[in-house]
């Protein structure tokens, strides 16, 4: 089962209307981007949006703010980063969101030490989230720049060693490795019943990701053919036109199924 949906809920004022539109279009997932800050601040708004999404059968997730670095040696910046993730978990609980996706951090001078330090922070975040009764899973994302923590193996090992969730961003993988590595990446998470996947077109250089672009249809076909049939998959599109691209992906998927 694949749940298609965009990155983007719109304003609080338009959120219910947008969820209803997504439902009519056949989109059953939506990632709320708090990338520039948690903009759903009122408890009542979060509960209302969450109830409507649940009623419509739309699975919500959250993308945490960009200003996160769990490898910062500046104690103030580190604590602020953790506060932002936990803030997303708090709102996400009210929204009944399944997971909070976040960028883990940046490399320093020693990748082994970086991994151990970020691992420690995630374990602390998991403990704090459990203590607070927050329900979303914590999902560090595979990143698209070569100088940023979060290659495939690092995310795989964080999942194994902390029990956290994960986000596979195949556009980031293409930018980082110059290849989508669909089969190889999925194999690393083969024991997981659910996959949370980001996908869109991407512009990249030798240093990795530059920015997202409209998703090529041929690339969507390659992705959909590669996804396992025996898992629940949430497929979030992050292109500049995420709703339109999600519809294109859904239609390709329907056509593929009809031809079988």
Image (cartoon, rainbow, N blue to C red):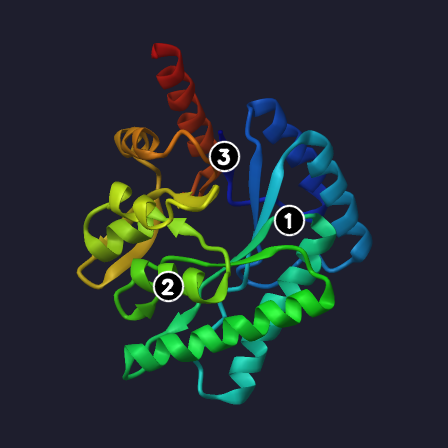
Left/right of residue 251 with respect to residue 8 in the rendered view: left
Position of 144 relative to 200 (above/below): below
Residue 103 or residue 228, whichever sits in front: 228
Pointer 1 or 2: first along the chain: 1
**Count the marks: how many?**
3
Residue at left offset 34%, top offset 65%: 154
Q: How much space separates mark 1 and mark 3, taking CA atoms?
A: 19 Å
Nearest-to-viewer mark from 1 and 2: 2
Report how far apart the C-alphas of labels 1 and 2 lie in the structure.
Answer: 24 Å
Picture coordinates of residue 234, whole percent (x, y): 49, 39
Give the SS element for disc 2.
helix
> Can residue 238 be seen here?
no
For mark 3, give the secondary structure.
helix
Q: Indicate the quadrant where residue 148 lies.
A: bottom left
- Relative side of 48 to 79, left or right: right
Residue 157's disc is 2
- Label 2 packing within 10 angstroms: few (<14), some (14-19), many (20+): some
Dot 1 or dot 3: first in sequence order is: 1
Structural distance between the alpha carbons of marks 2 and 3: 33 Å
Q: Which residue is mark 3?
A: 243
Q: Which quadrant of the view contains residue 20?
A: top right
Callout 2–callout 3 Cβ contact below 8 Å:
no
Can residue 30 be seen here? The reply is yes
Mark number displayed over residue 97: 1
- The relative height of residue 229 versus residue 175 in the rendered view (above or below) is above
Nearer to us: label 2 or label 3: 2
Q: Whole-percent x and y of residue 122? A: 51, 71
Foreground pick, 260 / 87:
260
Q: Nearer the viewer, residue 17 or 29?
A: 29
Which structural element holds mark 1?
A: loop
Q: Residue at x 73, y 32 (%)?
A: 55
The outermost residue toward the top is 259
């Amino acid at each position: 089962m694949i749940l298609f949906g965009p990155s983007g809920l719109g304003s609080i004022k338009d959120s219910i209307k947008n969820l209803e539109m997504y439902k009519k279009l056949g989109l059953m997932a939506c990632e709320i981007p708090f990338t520039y800050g948690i903009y759903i601040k009122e408890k009542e708004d979060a509960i209302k949006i969450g109830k409507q999404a649940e009623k419509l059968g739309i699975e919500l997730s959250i993308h945490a703010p960009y200003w996160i670095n769990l490898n910062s040696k500046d104690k103030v910046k580190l604590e602020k980063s953790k506060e932002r993730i936990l803030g997303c978990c708090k709102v996400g609980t009210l929204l009944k969101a399944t997971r909070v996706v976040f960028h883990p951090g940046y490399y320093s001078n020693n990748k082994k030490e970086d991994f151990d330090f970020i691992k420690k922070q995630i374990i602390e975040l998991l403990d704090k989230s459990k203590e607070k009764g927050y329900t979303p899973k914590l999902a560090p994302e595979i990143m698209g720049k070569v100088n940023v923590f979060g290659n495939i193996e690092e995310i795989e090992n964080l999942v194994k060693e902390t029990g956290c969730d994960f986000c596979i961003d195949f556009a980031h993988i293409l930018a980082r490795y110059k290849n989508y590595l669909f089969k190889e990446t999925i194999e690393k998470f083969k024991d997981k019943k659910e996959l949370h996947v980001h996908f869109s077109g991407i512009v990249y250089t030798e240093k990795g990701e530059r920015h997202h672009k409209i998703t090529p249809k041929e690339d969507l076909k390659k992705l959909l053919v590669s996804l396992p049939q025996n898992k629940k998959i949430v497929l979030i599109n992050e292109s500049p036109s995420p709703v339109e691209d999600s519809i294109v992906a859904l239609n390709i998927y329907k056509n593929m199924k009809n031809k079988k």
